């Protein structure tokens, strides 16, 4: 089945999938939050690849229907803004609250949040140094470090 002309798709190469990649993004500890979203960013191992996305939607957010609605909304928003995001970065989005923005206005709102959060994280002082360290493998933090766990 072919995709419609307006869709850019979400190929496997555009996703952060492996646990090691997630751990690397969380270990760099570069993040920004806005509303229900927290965006973590890390330079990709290959600087020329387009931006990649990983999602983390906890069971606390709601049942499977609500979690999958969030994931669909985030993937579609990422597809729309992917070309505007800085290349050579991996992004992981963590959802903090359960209400999914609805309708076309909600979709635009999520797109704007992702773009703004990515720009904020990448523009922060020290991110460029973290980027060069991560690409050279000389970072001070090990990728085996797990993200901090929240208490219930």
Image (cartoon, rainbow, N blue to C red):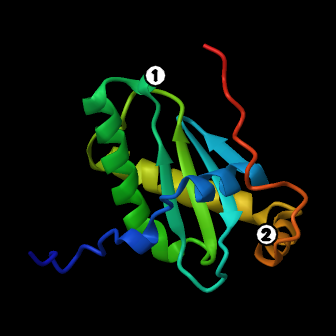
**Who's the residue at 35% across and 72% down the image?**
11
Residue highlighted by disc 1: 60
123 up-or-down from 59: above or below:
below
Q: In the figure, residue 46 lies in which quadrant?
A: bottom right
Residue density around tag 1, few if under 14, some if 14–19, many if 20 or more, within 10 Å: few
Question: Mark 1 or mark 2, which is nearer to you?
Answer: 2
Q: Is residue 116 visible?
A: no
| Residue 26 percent across, percent down from the top left | 69, 49
User: Which residue matches tag 2?
Assistant: 134
Instruction: Out of 123 and 54, give the one closest to the viewer.
Output: 54
Q: What element carries label 2?
A: helix
Q: Which one is nearer the viewer's eye here, 27 or 63?
A: 27
| Quarter where residue 141 is shown | bottom right
Which mark is first along the chain, 2 or 1?
A: 1
Q: The C terminus is located in which quarter?
A: top right
Residue 127 lies, with reference to residue 64, above or below; the image says: below
Q: Which of 112 and 42 is in front in this view?
A: 42
38 sits to left or right of 5? right
Placement of the N terminus among the 4 image quadrants: bottom left
State the residue at coordinates (62%, 54%): 117
């Amino acid at each position: 089945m072919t995709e419609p002309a307006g869709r850019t798709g979400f190929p496997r190469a555009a996703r952060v999938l492996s646990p090691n990649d997630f751990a690397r993004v969380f270990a760099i500890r570069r993040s920004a939050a806005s509303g229900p979203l927290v965006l973590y960013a890390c330079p990709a191992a290959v600087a020329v690849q387009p931006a990649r996305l990983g999602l983390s939607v906890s069971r606390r957010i709601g049942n499977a229907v609500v979690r999958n609605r969030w994931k669909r909304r985030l993937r579609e928003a990422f597809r729309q803004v992917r070309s505007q995001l800085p290349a050579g970065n991996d992004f992981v989005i963590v959802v903090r609250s359960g209400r999914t923005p609805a309708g076309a206005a909600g979709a635009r709102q999520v797109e704007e949040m992702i773009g703004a959060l990515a720009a904020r994280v990448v523009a922060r002082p020290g991110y460029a140094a973290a980027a060069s360290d991560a690409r050279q493998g000389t970072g001070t933090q090990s990728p085996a470090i797990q993200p901090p766990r929240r208490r219930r």
